[in-house]
Image (spheres, rainbow, N blue to C red):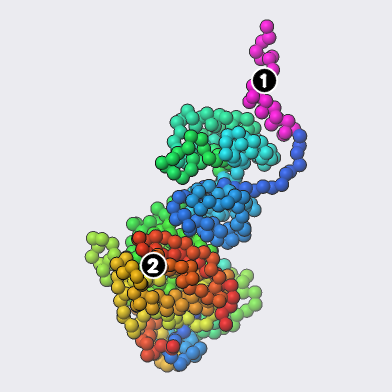
Amino acid sequence: MTTPRHRPCTCAKGGLRRWWRRRRRRNMALSNTLNRYLLLLAQEHLEFRLPEIKSLLSLLGGRFSSHQEIHGKSPFWILSIPSEDIARNLMKRTVCAKSIFELWGHGKSPEELYNSLKSYPVEKMAPFLHSDTTYKIKIHTFNKTLTQEEKIKRIDALEFLPFEGKVNLKNPQHIFSILEDYGLDPNHIPEKPLNIYFGRWIADGQRELIESYSVKKRHFIGNTSMDAGLSFIMANHGKVKENDIVFDPFVGTGGLLIPSAHFGAYVCGTDIDYNTVHGLGKASRKNQKWRGPDENIKANLRQYGLEKYYLDVLIADASKPSWRKGLFFDAIITDPPYGIRESTRKTGSQKEIPKGIEKCPESHIPVSFNYHLSDMFVDLLNFAAETLVLGGRLVYWLPVYTPEYMEEIVPRHPCLKLISNCEQRLSSHTARRLITMEKVKDFE
Amino acid sequence: MKLLTHNLLSSHVRGVGPRGFPLRIQATEVRVSPVDFNPDFVTRMIPKMEWTALVEAAESLGHLSELPRELAEGYEKDEEFLRKVHHVLLEVEVVEGTLQCPESGRLFPISRGIPNMLLSDEEAAS
């Protein structure tokens, strides 16, 4: 009778372990750097995500390339990024993405995943698995809930990976994640996952900014203050960076300046409304009678510790700018008034646009709406072409009457290239589109 | 209104063209507030400035602060110089006063640090 410890191990796991040891001993030459990352995105503002990630990668020196078709609605994107540094810097800016992982393997079944993991170069795994390290493995499932037992089974199945470090659940040096994708339809959850991914967690995105900069907590707001998430997306579409000068010609209560200041840009704006800029008159917040002395744009920046980035705000008509000739602005980020909630004005013509565009008859947009809009956007694009630095971006909201929208109505300019056009529905007949343009040619 | 902004502003009264710059400052209240020094930002701004106009404006407010009347070469590495520029660009603010168009004489009021550049239809350039 042989004693158990002398009996050679013949189990499947043992076979895999021996296979791993052989690979390590073989002293392989470094294979081609794959540098593939799995980006896990939040499921909101779906159309805005790709332009945000592309703009940020372009800002950071990467180029956008993807190993699979980017399904507009999927929260999982596999990207090629030149370095981990760039991946980390991407996450320091994005509010659309939740996390990024260095992708070690993926497949449409557990077997495919394990084969994929076996093809991942051992030398690239080694630094994170050696005996001096601590780690833990997490599992996330999307559109399905697993029992604790099921989760443990899946983590245990990865025992064949050459982990030599110690497990530390509280404060590990390295966190690995299994991500299982069960599709997007909560009414049709598949039995087996559609995709399984395994990767080393690198960093989380900036989604917490949405809560910390929430309009609910802000001291000074107006009727059209922008949702914090969208305002950060705008700054990212605008490729705002440290030491830039960012300008908002329809600044209102300054909400759009805040994300740019957060990213280290110096900010300024103009508005035609004296009361809004000075923080006078009826407050927008329910239950408040009037705006206090601390309610103004500078105070908003001060609330977040960003006062040093405040340059100036002026009372001015955006269609009659008061700047001397020159290229001063790195980005122009704005939400022009469009008569849906606040009236549109030019000095000398106090026409008030009929409010509640949703009540418009089905057959046409009122003439005055069209007239005021086209003037304003032509002025805005000309202004951007004249005052943006080369490569600088204009980011603005364009209101649309959905039944009559066509891509052709998006204003164009010979000096500005259209980068992206993202829709946000407002009601059954109305929407607004976030237009991003880049100056590619000098004016005149 | 900071002097950085003043350096970019011009009157657009009809007919004045480039002679609308620089606007003459008549200040009744000036405030100096500390702002964190950022040499990279200052270095980036200097090429965008009309240097003579900046010096004149600082002088008219009594805050010239030893700013040289001409830009010297290699200023990017001169921290003392950059600090002086930083002070003049960002720390000196006109709280109350007026800006005057040098060509037409038109006055633009500054109130609570905010200039009002609005012109009526008749005054504005087309």
Quadrant holding the N terminus of chain A: top right
Q: Give the magenta part as a residue range.
A: A1-25
Q: In this view, does A238 lie to the left or right of A283?
A: right
Separation of disc 2 and disc 1 at Cα? 69 Å
Quadrant holding the C terminus of chain A: bottom right
Q: Can residue A55 be seen from the camera position used here? A: yes
Q: State whether discs 2 and 1 lie on one chain.
A: yes
| Front one among A208 and B122 | B122
Secondary structure at numbered mark 2: strand
Marks 2, 1: nearer the viewer: 2
**Which amino acid, mark 2?**
Tyr
Q: Is residue A237 left or right of residue A403?
A: right
The disc label shown at residue A248, or none: none
| Label whose residue precedes the other's in the sequence (2 or 1) | 1
Instruction: Residue lying at the far top in this picture: please name it.
Output: A1
Query: Which quadrant of the view contains residue A15?
Result: top right
What residue do we see at 45% from left, 39% from top? A189
**Which amino acid, mark 1?**
Thr
A313 relative to A202, above or below: below
Q: How many labels does the image show?
A: 2
Query: Residue A442 in the image: x percent, y percent?
Result: 58, 78
Neighbourhood count class around disc 1 (C-alpha, 10 Å): few under 14, some 14–19, many 20 upward: few
Q: Is residue A10 magenta?
A: yes
| Front one among B25 and A255 | A255
A172 relative to A350, above or below: above
Task: Identify the residue under disc 1.
Answer: A10
Neighbourhood count class around disc 2 (C-alpha, 10 Å): few under 14, some 14–19, many 20 upward: some
Task: Identify the residue under disc 2.
Answer: A401
| Front one among A379 and A289 | A379
The main secondary structure of the magenta stretch is helix
Q: Can residue A308 be seen from the camera position used here? A: no
> Answer yes or no: do the residues labelled 2 and 1 have beta carbons within 8 Å?
no
